[in-house]
Image: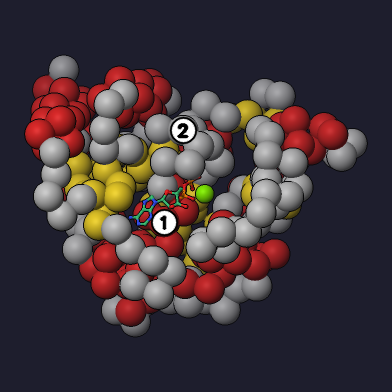
Amino acid sequence: MRGLFVTGTGTAVGKSVVAAAICAALAARGERVAAFKPAVTGLDEPAGEWPPDHELLAHVASAGQAPAGVAPYRFRPPVSPHFASELRGETIEPMRLVATARAAGAGADVLVCEGVGGLLVPLTAGYLVRDLAVDLGLPLVVAAHTGLGTINHTLLTVEAARAAGLRVAGVVMTPWPKRPAPIEASNRATVERLAAVPVSGLPQTDPRSLAAAGEALPLDRWLSPQKALGQRARGAH
Ligand SMILES: Nc1ncnc2c1ncn2[C@@H]1O[C@H](COP(=O)(O)OP(=O)(O)O)[C@@H](O)[C@H]1O
Ligand SMILES: [Mg+2]
């Protein structure tokens, strides 16, 4: 399956903005893009500039999915999906997640998945977001903050990914400022060097300018298996 799995160093780090920019840029090139999000939580939260993840992704993807088709499980409380489902007395079915994602991908040229929180967030008591990324076999894109704390969070995420055999195609620091502060420029170079992974910056964007923002991301390099920087990184260790 051709596609990308967008994870992040945590919650509210820009996964949805990055995933939506990727979808919009690929769709603008004429690709049939399907989106997938295993579970949306926090639908109780007040609406902001950005719509809920499954609505945003359905809007920018181009495979004609309804929001409910992007995210099979949707919960109101802003808690981990495994707990949100427990509160409702149901269990998230990993097989259903994998089948839904594969079906979405089968009807498209490319599948863009967004995780939930960070890589080690439980979808069920024993099935983590990382397990889903492994089951789908997609390379990772890691959304990360630009400032203080991001080196540690990003390197931990890359290590956790590689420990499970996942390929990290790239890191995206977001929003990337027009004039980065010295710490931001240093963080970007430091993560690139220590993780041996290409780090991109996604500029400040809004729901209407996603395609233009996503155009500047190295989409072809991420999607091309033979140019996998993760493999180079593994060889370098
Ligand atoms: N490139 C960007 N342009 C504009 N806003 C951004 C950008 N990156 C992150 N943000 C801000 O960060 C917030 C959290 O991003 P979001 O994609 O919802 O995070 P996550 O999906 O990881 O929870 C957004 O609501 C937005 O305000
Ligand atoms: Mg999100």
List the residue tagged with mark 2: 10
The residue positioned 35% from the left and 68% from the top of the image is 210
Vertical relation: 230 (above or below) 177: above
Residue 230: x and y in percent read 23, 35
73 relative position to 9: left or right: right
Q: Residues within 10 Å of mark 2 (few under 14, many from 20)?
A: many
Vertical relation: 152 (above or below) 105: above
Disc 2 within 8 angstroms of ligand 1 (CB): yes
Q: Earlier in the sequence, mark 1 or mark 2?
A: 2
Q: Which three-letter amino acid code belongs to the residue tagged 2?
A: Gly
Give the quadrant of residue 110.
bottom left
At mark 2, the secondary structure is: loop
219 relative position to 107: left or right: left
Q: Which three-letter amino acid code belongs to the residue tagged 1?
A: Val
Give the quadrant of residue 20.
bottom left
Residue 226: x and y in percent read 19, 49
Disc 1 within 8 angstroms of ligand 1 (CB): yes
